[in-house]
């Protein structure tokens, strides 16, 4: 057993549907007790200190400790090609993505990138992600091997593309090889340790009807598996999907027909959606990964978060970096872009709404809220320790916090934290992440920052 | 005399109107000779080395040296309120801006923020800016005093607001006080050392017709002065301007009627412009400050850079952080947002176009190209030394540069630099700035980085 003392923030409810102050749980001086890989106890320091007086304690002063961030849509093989210049989706795939991902036939190479990718996530405070791989099974093995070593909770799966013309022949799989390889990988990795498997047709346009049907078949055989894909990202893509699947009423319906839309199904992007599609997604309890950095970077469009988080058609929403089309590994930088995407639609994304999406909201969107996303005892001890003033700009902003240090009421302290945390949401990056814990283990510490 | 050796990049022409390779000047191994505060010589190292064998030389290996960045629209009094939450323009002004700027009645406070602001700019590689102050003359004095100590080229001016209801009474000036104080400040600061004065009506809505006429009068009396303001930023603002100035045909026409539109006039934002307004701006040779971070942050809209940089209606364009409505001090971060604003309109902003706007383009937009913006001998030695791989993400990206180190032709070297520089444009921030020189003096060096 060990304990961590400091200021803690997590969520008890969804602040999109509840008064924000009721939605959050903020302990200015809290104690979190870890037993093995899980949270054993959590509460106010003054109430728990005596009970745990004998165990080792790390004390983070002037920090904010939260559940680790959740990235619901990211491509590990694109680590090296982040910020490739100048194209929209389909041209970008052809020009940059497939040539890069072809390298992942080499398992040794794949493993080296998987390690680097996971370390980048940890450096940015992300402790769970839903991850695309390539069409090569060895790239999936390499990834889960790297995850297993860290005892980290990742969802990933073989990423199928079998449609001619969409990817180079040497990159494509077939409906049959995808089915066989996926089945084999599910047996090997799904629910082994903290690993979780997602049946992963890359996107409708990349798959034949047959490959999508095989996805449905796999989901029938392995109902606990996740399903992860892209949807309605780009106008040209959407037009081509309509052409390729004339029987489908819209993009979502392509997946509905394959029998894969429901809980544990995540559609990445979902930018250009009709009200009817929002209604069907809401009813099916599937989820959307909102990837604002990528959506701006590729010029795909503005996700209608106000519709997805409406009372009328509530859809589960998490955040995705979508690195490499997204230009960062940092969920904080994604929140900066999310704020801007909302602002362009005259919507306000508050810091608590943003941080909810980054933690419990992301966990719920992946149906992982029993395991991660908050600091409730029984969940895994996946934590991020934030420094809210790591740069001169943030330090000066915090110094001028309108809620000064002179008042110590809990309300005042909370308002003070809210102001600084919003600065971090807008100006933060990996410098804001002082430490990251996974399964109770300290896996990242910012260089030069000793752990107390 | 002293010299700097390294890789240099600047611009000879505008890459929006010229083949990019013809527009740039890239010296993989160059020598720049500084005499006093100016560039005395510049060329290939192998051609100049013998001539300057006896003078002291700083050698920056694996760096890219450029003219210092130009920020054509920024508010120094907002340094402490960067990233204030949740409002669009008019509400944001009322709720956050005026209360903060009232503090600048205190000259000592103003000076302390001016120093901090200038140091933030230098840390981000910005060596010239066009700067808003407040309605308080002492805030202008404080700013120019701080600039004079650094021998840095800044344009600034008393920032007038005299319209009732738009700002608190204690913040407002009058047409007369604005005129008298501006005249006094122009006499004291304009063209003294490297200081330059801008007649600065904050924005049309903040000024009465009388105050704007006084601006025209000042411009008539001091034709070498700059004029700096905001224009067509927000739909609600534009509607209110139309109401306040019923005689004007559009927002631009309010300024035209005051006789201030022409060379050395900068309109900040200019997001919502008719083709006719573009034509008139083009014909008048005035300029626009493109402030994408601010425009996204406040949800103001998408600047049509393709229209401003068109062959039909070319308008001078520079970049502005517009800090504090912009959420950064860094022109590199502004370029990230500029890329996204362009992408959302299906436009591509290449790295050379971006870096042109950040340097020579910005200088030209301010009619300062005789003094700054490129590395031509005779200009001031204002330089930024960039590290193109200061973070793990950028380092790994650079390591996978498709133009490997094995080939050494100049074309290949240039393509290699272009790829890494684009990474810096999209992922860079103050960590990318290793050193900043102003008037030949090293005024910023990244902590922990020794100058060679």
Image (cartoon, coloured by chain):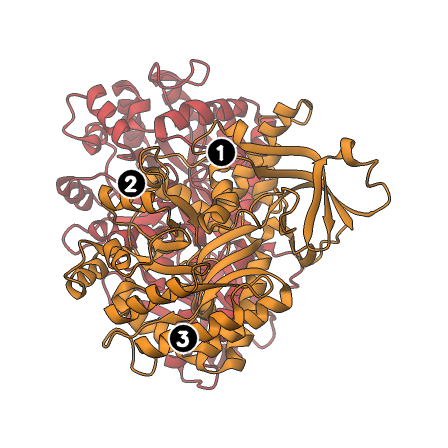
Chain colours: A red, B orange
| Separation of residues labelled 1 and 2 (CA atoms) | 21 Å
Above or below: residue A434 compared with residue B25 = below
Q: Nearer the viewer, residue A6 or B445?
A: B445
Q: Is residue A436 visible?
A: no
Q: State the CA–CA distance, disc 2 to disc 3.
A: 36 Å
Image quadrant of residue A423? bottom left
Q: Quadrant of the N terminus of chain A?
A: bottom right
Asked if A274 appears above or below A213 in the picture, the reply is below
The reply to the same-chain question for discs 1 and 2 is yes
Contact check, label 1 and label 3, Cβ < 8 Å: no
Residue shown at 78%/49% (left/top)? B2
Other residues around mark 3 within 10 Å, as few (<14) / some (14–19) / many (≥20): many
Q: Secondary structure at mark 3?
A: helix
Q: What residue does disc 3 label?
A: B101
Dot 2 corresponds to which residue? Answer: A301
Q: Mark 1 against mark 2, which lies toward the viewer?
A: 2
Horizontal relation, residue B75 to residue B152: left or right? left
On the same chain, marks 1 and 3? The answer is no
Q: Earlier in the sequence, mark 1 or mark 2?
A: 1
**Image spot of residue B123 (x, y percent):** 59, 58
Kind of element beneath mark 2: loop
Q: CA distance from mark 1 to mark 3?
A: 45 Å
């Amino acid at each position: 057993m060990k304990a961590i003392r400091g200021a803690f923030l997590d969520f008890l409810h969804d602040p999109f549907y509840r008064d924000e102050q009721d939605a959050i749980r903020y302990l200015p001086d809290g104690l979190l007790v870890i037993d093995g890989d899980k949270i054993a106890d959590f509460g106010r320091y003054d109430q728990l200190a005596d009970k745990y007086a004998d165990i080792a304690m790390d004390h983070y002063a002037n920090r904010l400790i939260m559940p680790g961030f959740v990235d619901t849509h990211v491509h590990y093989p694109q680590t090296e090609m982040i910020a490739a210049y100048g194209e929209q989706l389909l041209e970008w795939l052809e020009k940059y993505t497939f040539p890069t991902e072809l390298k992942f036939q080499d398992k040794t190479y794949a493993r080296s990138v998987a390690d680097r990718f996971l370390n980048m996530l940890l450096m940015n405070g992300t402790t769970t992600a839903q991850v695309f791989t390539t069409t090569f099974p060895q790239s999936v093995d390499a990834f889960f091997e790297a995850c297993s070593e860290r005892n980290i909770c990742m969802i990933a799966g073989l990423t199928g593309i079998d449609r001619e013309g969409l990817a180079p022949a040497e990159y494509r799989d077939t409906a049959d090889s995808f089915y066989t390889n996926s089945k084999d990988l599910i047996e090997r990795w799904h629910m082994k340790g903290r690993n979780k498997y997602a049946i992963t047709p890359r996107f409708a346009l990349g798959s034949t009807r047959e490959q999508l049907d095989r996805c449905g078949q796999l989901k029938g055989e392995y109902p606990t598996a996740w399903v992860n894909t892209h949807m309605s990202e780009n106008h040209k893509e959407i037009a081509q999907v309509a052409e390729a699947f004339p029987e489908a009423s819209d993009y979502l319906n392509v997946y509905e027909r394959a029998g894969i839309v429901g809980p544990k199904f995540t559609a990445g992007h979902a930018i250009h959606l009709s009200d009817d599609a929002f209604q069907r997604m809401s009813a099916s309890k599937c989820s959307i990964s909102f990837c604002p950095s990528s959506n701006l970077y590729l010029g795909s469009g503005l996700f209608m978060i106000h519709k997805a988080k409406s009372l009328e058609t509530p859809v589960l929403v998490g955040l995705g970096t979508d690195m490499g089309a997204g230009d960062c590994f940092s969920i904080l930088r994604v929140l900066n872009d999310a704020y801007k995407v909302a602002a362009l639609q005259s919507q306000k994304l508050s810091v608590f709404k943003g941080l909810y999406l980054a933690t419990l909201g992301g966990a719920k969107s992946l149906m992982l809220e029993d395991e991660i996303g908050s600091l409730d005892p029984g969940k895994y001890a996946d934590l991020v320790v934030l420094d809210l003033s790591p740069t001169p700009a943030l330090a000066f902003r915090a110094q001028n916090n309108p809620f000064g240090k002179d008042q110590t009421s809990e309300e005042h302290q909370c308002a003070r934290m809210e102001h600084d945390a919003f600065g971090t949401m807008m100006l933060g990056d990996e410098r804001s992440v002082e430490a990251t814990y996974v399964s109770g283990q300290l896996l990242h510490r910012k260089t030069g920052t000793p752990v107390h």
